Amino acid sequence: MLNSLGILLVATVIIFVEVPPLLEKKQKKELIIFTIILIIGVTLSILRSFGINIPNPLDLLTFIFKPMNDLIRV
């Protein structure tokens, strides 16, 4: 629980540092992308802090391309 509060505290600091310049420059698209990526990162970090195993994206690519590799190798 303490880990997740620490993660949220760091995310809050990042928001206070990064968001005001984006608002001043009226960069709405960048703000939306920044928010989405920050939410994904915070969510994954909190899940990891609770010990939940998050699959590696490389595992999906291996699952997709391994049969093709085996076909070519034959």
Image (cartoon, rainbow, N blue to C red):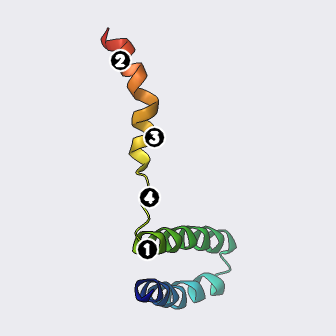
* Of marks 3 and 4, the one in the foreground: 4
Q: Earlier in the sequence, mark 1 or mark 2?
A: 1
* Of marks 1 and 2, the one in the foreground: 1
Q: Which residue is mark 4?
A: 54
* Of marks 3 and 1, the one in the foreground: 1
From the viewer's perspective, is residue 37 above or below residue 21? above
Crowding at label 1, few (<14), some or many (≥20) Cα neighbours within 10 Å?
few
SS at circle 4: loop
Q: Earlier in the sequence, mark 3 or mark 1?
A: 1
Amino acid type at mark 1: Phe
Q: Earlier in the sequence, mark 2 or mark 4?
A: 4
Q: Which residue is mark 3?
A: 60
Contact flag, marks 2 and 4 (Cβ < 8 Å): no
Crowding at label 2, few (<14), some or many (≥20) Cα neighbours within 10 Å?
few
Q: Which residue is mark 2?
A: 70
Amino acid type at mark 3: Leu
The answer to whether residue 21 is left or right of residue 74 is right
User: Where residue 28 appears, x then y in whole percent?
Assistant: 69, 74
The answer to whether residue 30 is left or right of residue 17 is right
Q: Quadrant of the N terminus?
A: bottom left
Amino acid type at mark 2: Asp
